[in-house]
Image (cartoon, grey):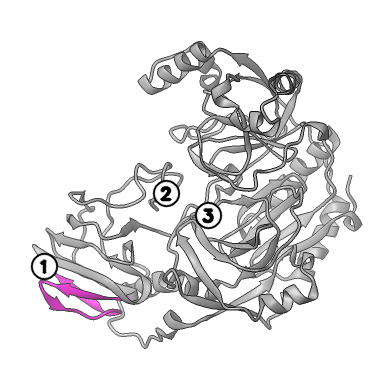
């Protein structure tokens, strides 16, 4: 069992996501940084049961009442197990009564705590990923007791060490493809789009907002499908990039689509950071 | 019905999009819904989702899928498939409260001209809508059937809070908010009956192509239904949901 001593800034449980329900308007959810999520699975072993917490900006303080193994991936936060500094991207042994505490991020935005246990949480439409109001809450809260299913404690088929490149946490370039409505932009606007630094004015699991000087005419466009990483441009020049809890359809022109890799990069960017779009070379 | 020349292809990463000209009639509904089913069966193992909007079918592939291959397969499916499997379109009536407190946006749009608001709402009640698809938020239905002359542009600055049940107009589209949410559409009334219930195996009961007509209820009736939902007790207006 995990006792939540302090919830941190925004900590939620995320799994592979709620796939197959977009036709009901349900967003896919799941980890914002799929790369860091995947690394946890690689290290703890895909064949093992794993539960994951996504911690944004400031991590939680957790007391483990039973032994288990954990791995931290993603953003770098100062992490301590019983007041002793521990490393990221490596398997940690947690004993009963151990306390894990994560501080504010030093590099990146989202840290993942992977636990080799099956946490007993609400499963809605095939997924345990937090998404209010489908699930009762959007975050874990101080005082929560997260129980897990009893299982063998020994870890099988794990990788203790993997050579891992974390440099994407600091990339400023977002690789993109042209979106279906890219053609509404004129030549100058296209040039501007790929030259101007874009400052993240606001971000959360639903999406990212950037202000730009691009202006387009309002249009009676019929709502169209969007997915995580779709870039919409509003008439006032705001760029909206959908996140994993983002709406499944939208009414603004879809000018770009981030690559999966670019979404991982963006998920690790704190508000106020400047990024650039770069047109991807790969043909689609 | 549509030929491959009438379909345009685009994509958002691994999501492939088929766009076609949209019209509101049964021929189009039959075609889109049948074609969606055909595509769902054909690509079952390769996709994680298939959705429709007014004028598109969207295939959410699990992995990258080759463009040319997709085009060739779609052309062949269009040629070889039958799109006339009968679809049972149902009719639903939904209560809506149209008192002043629920239609502030419309009042704003008509600059406080009460008779224009009244005329608009009367006309709205006489219309028959059709559910085209769910999108935006879980259980948010997009309805067609609003004549062009009744379209109201999306708000320039979205409302910070549009309430659950709000019946709203965004351009020529009509929708009902399933939960409180920021929203850029113009609220014209409130429907107390939830269209999306996560506790049910199939959370929705109105399907794509189904007909919807609104009937007016008083604020008192609205409160009665809302209270019944809060307390978890039965109410005649909630009955139809239980028929599934």
Q: Quadrant of the C terminus of chain A?
A: bottom right
Q: Earlier in the sequence, mark 2 or mark 1?
A: 1
Have a look at marks 3 and 2 and say if they share a chain.
yes
Residue that badge 2 annotates: A131
In which quarter of the view is residue A236 placed? bottom right
Answer yes or no: do the residues labelled 3 and 2 have beta carbons within 8 Å? Answer: no
**Measured Cα–Cα span from mark 3 to mark 2:** 10 Å
Q: Nearer the viewer, residue A244 or B7?
A: A244
Residue that badge 3 annotates: A246
Q: Residue at x 84, y 40 (%)?
A: B23
Dot 3 falls on a residue whose secondary structure is loop
Protein chain holding label 2: A
Q: Which mark is residue B106?
A: none
Q: Earlier in the sequence, mark 3 or mark 1?
A: 1
Have a look at marks 2 and 1 and say if they share a chain.
yes
Q: Residue at x 90, y 52 (%)?
A: B3
Q: Which residues are magenta?
A: A76-95
Residue that badge 1 annotates: A95
Q: Nearer the viewer, residue B235 or B35?
A: B235
Residue A155 lies left or right of residue A250; in this view the side is: left
Question: Crowding at label 2, few (<14), some or many (≥20) Cα neighbours within 10 Å?
Answer: many
Answer yes or no: do the residues labelled 3 and 1 have beta carbons within 8 Å? Answer: no
Dot 2 falls on a residue whose secondary structure is loop
Is the residue A145 above or below the residue A234 in the image?
above
Foreground disc of the pair 2, 1: 2
């Amino acid at each position: 069992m995990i006792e939540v001593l302090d919830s941190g800034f925004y900590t939620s449980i995320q799994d592979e996501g709620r796939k197959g329900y977009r036709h009901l308007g349900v967003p896919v959810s799941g980890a914002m940084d799929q790369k860091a999520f995947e690394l946890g699975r690689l290290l703890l072993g895909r064949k093992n049961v794993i539960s994951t917490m996504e911690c944004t900006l400031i991590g939680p303080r957790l007391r483990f009442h039973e032994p288990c193994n954990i791995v931290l991936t993603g953003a770098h936060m100062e992490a301590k197990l019983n007041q002793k500094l521990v490393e990221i991207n490596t398997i940690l042994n947690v004993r009963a009564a151990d306390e894990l505490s994560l501080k504010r991020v030093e590099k990146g935005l989202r840290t993942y705590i992977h636990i080799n246990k099956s946490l007993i949480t609400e499963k809605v439409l095939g997924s345990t990923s937090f998404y209010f109001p489908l699930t009762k809450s959007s975050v874990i809260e101080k005082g929560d007791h997260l129980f897990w299913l009893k299982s063998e404690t020994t870890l099988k088929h794990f990788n203790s060490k993997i050579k891992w490149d974390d440099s994407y946490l600091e990339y400023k370039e977002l690789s993109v493809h042209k979106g279906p409505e890219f053609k509404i932009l004129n030549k100058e606007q296209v040039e501007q789009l790929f030259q101007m630094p874009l400052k993240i004015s606001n971000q959360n699991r639903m999406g990212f907002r950037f202000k730009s000087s691009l202006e387009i005419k309002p249009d009676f466009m019929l709502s169209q499908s969007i997915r995580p990483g779709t870039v919409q441009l509003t008439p006032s020049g705001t760029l909206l990039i959908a996140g994993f809890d983002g709406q499944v359809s939208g009414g603004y022109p879809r000018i770009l689509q981030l690559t999966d890799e670019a979404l991982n990069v963006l998920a690790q960017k704190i508000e106020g950071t400047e990024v650039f779009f770069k047109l991807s070379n790969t043909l689609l | 019905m549509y030929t491959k020349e009438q379909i345009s292809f685009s994509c958002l990463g691994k999501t492939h999009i088929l766009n076609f000209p949209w019209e509101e009639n049964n021929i189009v509904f039959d075609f889109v819904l049948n074609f969606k089913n055909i595509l769902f069966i054909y690509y079952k193992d390769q996709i994680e989702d298939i959705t429709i909007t007014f004028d598109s079918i969207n295939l959410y592939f699990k992995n990258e899928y080759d463009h040319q291959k997709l085009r060739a397969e779609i052309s062949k499916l269009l040629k070889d498939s039958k799109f006339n499997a009968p679809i049972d379109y149902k009719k639903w009536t939904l209560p809506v409260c149209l008192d002043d407190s629920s239609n502030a946006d419309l009042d704003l749009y008509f600059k406080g001209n009460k008779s224009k608001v009244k005329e608009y709402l009367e006309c709205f009640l006489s219309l028959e809508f059709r559910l085209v698809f769910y999108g935006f938020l879980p259980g948010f239905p997009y309805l067609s059937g609003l004549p062009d002359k009744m379209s109201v542009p999306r708000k320039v600055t979205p409302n910070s809070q549009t309430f659950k049940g709000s019946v709203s107009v965004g351009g020529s589209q009509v929708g009902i908010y399933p939960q409180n949410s920021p929203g850029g559409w113009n609220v014209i009334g409130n429907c107390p009956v939830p269209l999306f219930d996560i506790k049910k195996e199939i959370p929705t009961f109105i399907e794509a192509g189904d007909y919807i007509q609104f009937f007016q209820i008083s604020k008192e009736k609205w409160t009665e239904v809302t209270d019944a939902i809060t307390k978890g007790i039965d109410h005649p207006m909630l009955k139809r949901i239980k028929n599934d």
